[in-house]
Amino acid sequence: MAAFFLPLVLLSSQVHAMPSVGRAVADYVEANRARHTGDGIISIDVARNPNYSPNGLAEYSRALAKWGADAHGPLAGIAANKGQVGALDATPFNGDREYLSPVEFGTPPQRLIMDLDTGSADVWVYSTETEPSDVGSRAIYHPGNSVTAEKINSSTWHIEYGDGSAAYGNVWRDTITIAGVSIFNATIETAVEVSRSIVDDPYMCGVFGLGFSLPSQITPPRPTVLSNMLPLLNSNLFTADLKYQSNGTYTFGHIDSALYTGDTVYYTPLLDNAQYWEFNFTGFNVASTTAGASQDENSIWFLNEWKAIADTGTTLILVDDDIVAKYYSRVPSAHYNDSIAVWTFPCATTDLPDFNIGFAGVHDWSARVPGKFVNYTALPDSYDNSTCMGGIQSNDGLPFAILGDIFLKAVFAVFDVGGKRIGFAPKALVA
Ligand SMILES: *[C@@H]1O[C@H](CO)[C@@H](O)[C@H](O)[C@H]1NC(C)=O
Ligand SMILES: *[C@@H]1O[C@H](CO)[C@@H](O)[C@H](O)[C@H]1NC(C)=O
Ligand SMILES: *[C@@H]1O[C@H](CO)[C@@H](O)[C@H](O)[C@H]1NC(C)=O
Ligand SMILES: *[C@@H]1O[C@H](CO)[C@@H](O)[C@H](O)[C@H]1NC(C)=O
Ligand SMILES: *[C@@H]1O[C@H](CO)[C@@H](O)[C@H](O)[C@H]1NC(C)=O
Ligand SMILES: *[C@@H]1O[C@H](CO)[C@@H](O)[C@H](O)[C@H]1NC(C)=O
Ligand SMILES: *[C@@H]1O[C@H](CO)[C@@H](O)[C@H](O)[C@H]1NC(C)=O
């Protein structure tokens, strides 16, 4: 139901080993239930890098050094093409569980519907190399039909999951066209096998990683598609404007001021050495808009520094337990259901308060997530159609919060690679 990567803490305290925070790999409810009851009907996928070395930064520099020689191939031809801008739709599926966007692979272009994921760095697709039972009826990439496709011999990608299942495949070079911008000789990871919970999502044809400076899971290392795309763009940034139950927009290379209100984007710096889109939020407030809410309670701000990542590939807002508890303490009908490890409330609840968030270095503005957005979805009918699941849940002890789609729907977001910062601006909301 909720795209989520739950898992990190279950396996390892070294959560930064995880290459893919963002990819929607597990159903939140089922995964939680399985975890808490131990009857594991549905596996919990954990993106775990078995080769993780605690010195991630050193690893990364080494990887960069290795790319040196190869980078000239992919980047050839940029001079003629730089300065581009483009936009594409982000369409919600399954009640805002995930947002998918059309991306074209090869020559002539083959259009696949991809999950643009700021929480991971790999661009992988279902292809003619994928196990047919994994493919189902979705569109796939046919390298054999692309005159620009070239297999990169003796190069593979491989992600292992916590339940022992795995996704892995081969590596190709081909043209990728996203938002009208063509990236020549981009690295495309073609899946050979894909784990069940990913396969069970019938819409998505692949994941398009847009992590800040996370290396991809290719051996030997190769530059990420984002790093190949940036030199082609007018500015080294992209933006996300996800929408509540309707089509939103990603833009590349420019900021479209029509997508937000006011004239200011509020920027907060990324953490030193960030690999994810990771920054601090410095305050939150829970304010009810319903009549009768106490002004005193509404005006309370809790201040601290909490690390967070902005992740388009995670459905929910996942924060520390005490923040979750403070939010639901303002929802009289909410309760924490132990057996599924999820905060729930009756779907008829109309008193969900707004969740306001303040950011490091931003003094005169905070983001408002409308209470309505926190009514994420009704639990599946096997549970009870009249019980709804909250869009704010525990991060299960992770050392950072994950501000996923429930948050991103509420703002216009600028992922500024060049400025090593992330920006948010208010926009017109349906609630
Ligand atoms: C792509 O790579 C191939 C082989 O390495 C090279 O011949 C070609 O010029 C490259 N194309 C571009 C546009 O960089
Ligand atoms: C990769 O291997 C295939 C099959 O052995 C071969 O046809 C192709 O030329 C090789 N490509 C490169 C770039 O070496
Ligand atoms: C949303 O975007 C998709 C994909 O581009 C498109 O097929 C669909 O018609 C759009 N829906 C609306 C309501 O604009
Ligand atoms: C984020 O918060 C941590 C912990 O309080 C602090 O050490 C760090 O300087 C902050 N970084 C930024 C960029 O705000
Ligand atoms: C909450 O969401 C559920 C499922 O989408 C919906 O049936 C219900 O009416 C919503 N509740 C409110 C108060 O909007
Ligand atoms: C839940 O809703 C679905 C369709 O909306 C219906 O088929 C099912 O019977 C309902 N289940 C319960 C327990 O009410
Ligand atoms: C917790 O959730 C389970 C599964 O939906 C449900 O059967 C149970 O009644 C819920 N418990 C409470 C106290 O609501």
Image (spheres, rainbow, N blue to C red):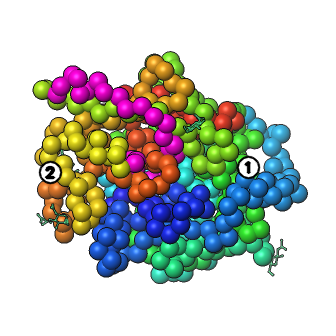
> Please, which residue is most extreme toward the right here?
69
Q: Where residue 99 sits: x, y (%)? A: 44, 51
Q: Residue at x 80, y 43 (%)?
A: 78
The one nearer the camera, 114 or 359, is: 359
Q: Is residue 89 above or below residue 195?
A: above
Asked whether the residues under the numbered discs 1 and 2 touch, taking CB atoms below 8 Å apart as contact, a structural biologist would say no
Q: Where residue 262 sits: x, y (%)? A: 45, 18
Q: Residue at x 25, y 27 (%)?
A: 298
Task: Tell me the residue that label 2 is attached to.
Answer: 346
Amino acid bearing label 1: Asn
Residue 112 shows in the view: no
Q: Residues within 10 Å of mark 2 (few under 14, many from 20)?
A: some
Q: Residue at x 36, y 68 (%)?
A: 31
Apparent side of residue 427 relative to residue 286 in the rendered image (left or right)? right
Q: Is residue 377 above or below residue 407?
A: below
Q: Which residues are magenta?
A: 293-320
The local secondary structure at tag 1 comes to helix
Task: Check residue 228 in the rendering and tell me which mark sits there, or answer none.
Answer: 1
Q: Residue at x 19, y 69 (%)?
A: 382
Q: Is residue 113 above or below residue 87?
A: below
Amino acid bearing label 2: Pro
